[in-house]
Image (cartoon, coloured by chain):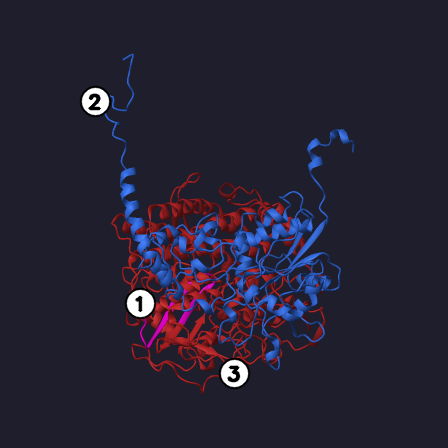
Chain colours: A red, B blue
Amino acid sequence: MSTQTVTQAPAKPRTLVEMSWDPITRIVGSLGIYTKIDFANKEVAECYSTSSIFRGYSIFMKGKDPRDSHFITSRICGICGDNHATCAMYAQNMAFGIRPPNMGEWIVNLGEAAEYMFDHNIFQDNLVGVDFCEQMVKETNPGVWEKAKHTEARHAEAHGYKTIADIMTALNPFTGEFYRETLHVSRYTREMFCLMEGRHVHPSTLYPGGVGTVPTMQLFTDYLVRLTHYCEFMKKVVPLHDDLFDFFYEALPGYEKVGQRRILLGCWGSFNDPEVCDYKYENMNAWGNRMFVTPGVIVDGKLVTTNLVDINLGIRILLGSSYYDDWVNDEKFVDKDPLGNPIDQRHPWNQTTIPRPQKRDFNGNYTWVMSPRWYHADEPGDKKYLALDTGGGPIARLWATALAGKVDIGYVKATGHSVKIYLPKTAMKPEAEFEWRIPRWSNAIERDRARTYFQAYAAACALHFCEQALKELHAGNTKTWTEFKVPDESIGCGFHEAVRGVLSHHVVIRDGKIANYHPYPPTPWNANPRDVYGTAGPYEDAVQNTPLFEENGPDTFKGIDIMRTVRSFDPCLPCGVHMYVGNGKVLETSHSPMFGMMK
Amino acid sequence: MSAAIEPYGRTTQKPPAIKDVHILWITAGLGCDGDSVSVTAATQPSIEDVLLGAIPGLPKVHLHNPVLAYEVGDDFMKYWYKAEQGLIDPFVLVVEGSIPNENIKQDGYWAALGADPMTGQPIKTTEWIDRLAPKAVACVAIGTCATYGGIHAMEGNPTGCMGLADYLGWDWRSKAGLPIVNVPGCPVQPDNFMETLLYLLYQLAGLAPMIPLDAELRPTWLFGKTVHEGCDRAGYYEQADFASEYGSPKCIVKLGCWGPVVNCNVPKRGWMAGLGGCPNVGGICIGCTMPGFPDKFMPFMDEPPGSRLSAGTVGVYGRIVRKLRGLTNSTVNKEPKWRHTGTELTTGYRPRAF
């Protein structure tokens, strides 16, 4: 059964209607969501998340040259491919025993910061934003639209939109002013990315050992000028989203329950600090804790660890409802990590991927996504395998960073309960400091809100990285790459934050070739199905707990609250779900008040 | 309305041969949606330029792409069913991602889009291509996966996947007589795709002749030159001045760049707004636009076998040329000797009045 919030007994007898959305659009990749909805009680009773694509990276990478892994794995994802390339490069650095020159690391950090700035921006306001636009709100909650017309935006002077309805109109696809402005911003931020990593979305200038980018005054000037434009843009966007999201709590009391689940968040850390990061596994805790986004696992609001070694050891890949055979009797590639800790057979280092295509069966196997879990000995029984989610990335990153209280670079300060983000004066706007405070819930609105704040966070970090890179340049330190030799036998792992959350790459090298390679991107963590213990994946779990505020009945139902829930996780399924509204067929009628509990 | 108040210049505007055209864009091949994302980066023209009718003479374009669509689920899929029933006509079918071989296994699916209302089972991507390709006015394969197979068709892959032309046949013609149009790149260079789409829209509007394609079905004006021919580091090559480590501004052919033999315009065009690219900014060309990608270019970071001979041959000539140019360069770096202070004019002019 589900380990999450206990659903209250429904007031009225349940009549479940099967509804599905397949494909879910305005995300990257193939996702279907299949639900059973109780319209009388206005809630979702069951949800199944399914993905309809299999490609087989871990299969066709076997036997290939380990230097090729970042070029290959970039192609896993068409929006955050560079996060894969970067993570693969981190794993190569560990496996090859190399440390890039400082300048190389700053260039990678600047590229990855641009990726966060671009990707969160386009997803938030060209894809998620449409769920909050005039056209959508009118079609799903006409009452809310009426209220929005008469609600003044608190920060109108900062963003220029007088009412909440004005913001919603500006978000209309293609015709909306803010929608189009965001598209434009998504372009110059990608130009910033291309300056550092060559091409978006599959970089050309990353290598094990550093980068091929030539560090010049022109490079950093071209980047910095665009960055200042983005800083100015953020001074408008943060208050704009605060106004929009706060309005939903006001207009629809109880909206905090939409997409809410138990606080189980993972963040694998981002932006290495070249002063300390030597890519040695033995020192991983030390350099992980110096990352400019602190890694961490958060359980019920408490920070369980910030140690990347603990994080690594806890990863388990469970089967359950996916189309794969078990590998428990296959070869064990890594018995112990370099510190002597035992490595589980269900750890990515030891995984063997054995696809078995089959019919989709929601009572059996129904997706190509496996179920990653994080083993936490403090939990009881089979609850030890935590279904961590990433909350789409930013909420987990800000939460872990805030609680850990380690990051302090002037532009960003983690306080133990919040993160302060400073943006200096720009052409038309004065300096500004934003403070992201740990929210009361892990829910759809807070996942979305954190995304905006993290855009500002990434910009603030980029200002710091730019200063550091210029310092190196002024000192004449223009070397960007360290030579290396591929060892015959080695293992490596990389930890990074893809835009939408945790990312790890695990590699085993034998005879100078890849013997095993398993990347774990954020979406498998979020979009996975029920595991062998029956624990639902985070999308399923979050949707199952969702009350419905949409004013439409079954005949014209759009599922907007479900869409907002799923999209709050920033699904990206080349790495890993389908939502499906059937024909509104009544499935079963149950008078049991306990049906809201699974099993 | 009286003709008198119409602008005279309106006579320049002709209504397109077709009023509306739909673009049905399947991203459910084995891909990464990177080409859809790439297209949002285009500015020449941008996606909104095309959808909002910014360019005169074109039909009204209705885009159905899952990454950008307003509609979800069945609301989104209804266009696919309508197209299948001939209720949307004309439409251009864009295919993204490589086409898996669904015939090599007993059951299940490698790639699918939507679900069959009768059985509840996913509808295979190949099934959609079979249903829609015969009705499309044109079929466009976007990105190297859809054009030639790409990364997911690498040796040792479990899905047996291939490019669209491998699946439909290289001599396939649409009902309007167009071959498959391939716009490769991993991902596609943003403006390369939008420019090709624009050409097809002109062609459908009756404003352009048949799109010129090469034997690999690529637009000739985009893929007729090599990376090297457009690379701003080719001058280093000519002077046999090769980089020995990444991060150098010199020619990186010895570090694994395949530019001299790869059909692609990226170094010339840049990635976006003229910025970025591959060898021009320090990234080895791994041949990502080519039918032989990736296997024929791996391991990527080794020097291409052919370049040892060619780069060696250019060595003697290149070194002499570099030396001579160095001498000339230091000469042209000096100003002519008559630019000086003092009381004497040495420019060659003989003054008569001062």
Q: Vertical placement of A568 versus A421: above or below?
A: below
Task: Give the residue pinned by disc 3.
Answer: A325
Q: Nearer the viewer, residue B172 or A209?
A: B172
Of helix, strand and loop, which one carries label 1? loop
Same chain for mark 1 and mark 2? The answer is no
In which quadrant of the rendered view does residue A254 lie?
A: bottom right
Q: Residue furthest left?
A: B342
Which chain does the numbered disc 2 sit on? B
In magenta, the rendered stretch is A485-505
Q: CA distance from mark 1 to mark 2?
A: 64 Å
Of helix, strand and loop, which one carries label 3? loop
Give me the disc on residue B342.
Answer: 2
Of helix, strand and loop, which one carries label 2? loop
Q: Main secondary structure of the magenta part?
A: strand
In which quadrant of the rendered view does residue A367 lie?
A: bottom right
Same chain for mark 2 and mark 3? The answer is no
Q: Where is residue B296 drawn, in percent x and y? A: 46, 68
Q: CA distance from mark 2 to mark 3?
A: 91 Å
- Please state, as top left, top right, bottom left or bottom right, where the C terminus of chain B lies in the image: top left
- A176 vs A591, left or right, is left
Asked whether residue A470 is in view, the answer is: no
Taking the magenta stretch, the answer to whether it contains residue A498 is yes
Task: Give the residue pinned by disc 1.
Answer: A279
- A9 vs A432, left or right, is right
- Tally of numbered discs: 3
Amino acid bearing label 2: Gly
